[in-house]
């Protein structure tokens, strides 16, 4: 069940991903950082493939117990690079969406909790990346929205699948049917993000959350995330049975046994 955090896994994964994205794994924490600041970290083909490769590596590397998503520059992620996609055929755009979706699924289907340091702007497909995190932190000046229809496109990258789960169907429709950008406080009130902090503290606070998972009951946090994220694949009876199986397995593990005894 799950994976041990372990020690000795701190390293740079040189060559594992492409230039527009950085992946670093240190002492159980995998940091995935978008690095196209001049493009507001918007996805083009190169970033799409780098994202897929990084998330696959982060979720399959032994010892990883938490994942942190961040972006360099003024934005967390502005979705798709409209200039890069304007000359693409629709079939190619669909193919790129499939590549990015592989990365989203790697996060969503893993038993590793994910925190997002979503500073600045989060829009379009960037909203899908945020929704693939389990705990999102934004700055007080952050803005979040859909904006797909502004360029004549439809929601992708899990937005139509996960947005209504996060904020409710009526509010999800407000975002995809208008050009509204939520303020940080509105996103918090809607349940889209977990915390609003000073803009200068977004990354620091996300790292604190990730470290709290790593220094706490790491495997239990991971299994709790898995139970919630995989709920749709089971009936209620099956979910209750899976809860019973999981808590029993946790008690039989070293982490659960020692923490129950200490409590």
Image: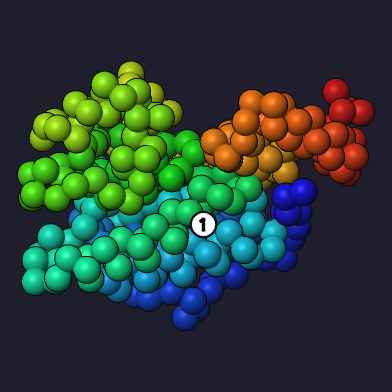
Residue 70 position within the rendered picture, expressed as x and y whole percent measured from the top left: 38, 51
Specify the farthest residue to the top.
189
Circle 1 is placed at which residue position? 106
Q: Looking at the image, which residue sits at the far bottom?
A: 15
**Residue located 69% across and 32% down the image:** 238
Q: Nearer the viewer, residue 99 or 237?
A: 237
Instruction: Name which residue lies at 24% across and 36% down.
Output: 144
Query: Is residue 62 shown left or right of residue 184?
Result: right
User: Would you say 227 lies left or right of 180 here?
Assistant: right
Q: Residue at x 37, y 40 (%)?
A: 161
Whether residue 235 can be seen here:
yes
Q: Position of residue 140 (x, y in %)?
A: 27, 30
Front-most of residues 62 and 179: 179
Please tell me whether mark 1 sits on a helix, a strand or a loop.
helix
Q: Nearer the viewer, residue 27 or 1?
A: 1
Q: Residues within 10 Å of mark 1 (few under 14, many from 20)?
A: many
């Amino acid at each position: 069940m799950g994976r041990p955090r372990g020690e000795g896994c701190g390293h740079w994964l040189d060559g594992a991903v492409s230039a527009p994205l950085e992946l670093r794994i240190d002492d159980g924490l995998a940091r995935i950082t978008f690095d196209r600041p001049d493009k507001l970290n918007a996805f083009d083909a190169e970033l799409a493939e780098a994202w897929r490769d990084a998330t696959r590596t982060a979720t399959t590397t032994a010892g990883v117990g938490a994942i942190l998503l961040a972006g360099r520059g003024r934005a967390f992620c502005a979705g798709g690079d409209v200039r890069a996609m304007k000359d693409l055929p629709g079939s190619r755009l669909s193919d790129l969406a499939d590549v990015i979706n592989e990365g989203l699924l790697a996060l969503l289907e893993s038993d590793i909790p994910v925190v997002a340091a979503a500073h600045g702007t989060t829009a379009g497909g960037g909203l899908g990346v945020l929704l693939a995190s389990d705990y999102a932190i934004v700055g007080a000046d952050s803005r979040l929205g859909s904006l797909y229809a502004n360029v004549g496109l439809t929601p992708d990258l899990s937005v139509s699948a996960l947005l209504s789960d996060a904020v409710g169907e009526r509010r999800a429709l407000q975002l995809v049917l208008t050009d509204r950008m939520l303020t940080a406080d509105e996103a918090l009130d809607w349940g889209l993000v977990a915390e609003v902090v000073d803009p200068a503290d977004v990354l620091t606070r996300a790292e604190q959350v990730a470290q709290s998972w790593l220094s706490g009951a790491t495997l239990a946090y991971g299994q709790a995330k898995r139970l919630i994220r995989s709920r749709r694949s089971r009936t209620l009876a099956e979910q209750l049975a899976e809860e019973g199986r999981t808590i029993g397995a946790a008690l039989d593990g070293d982490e659960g046994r020692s923490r129950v005894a200490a409590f």
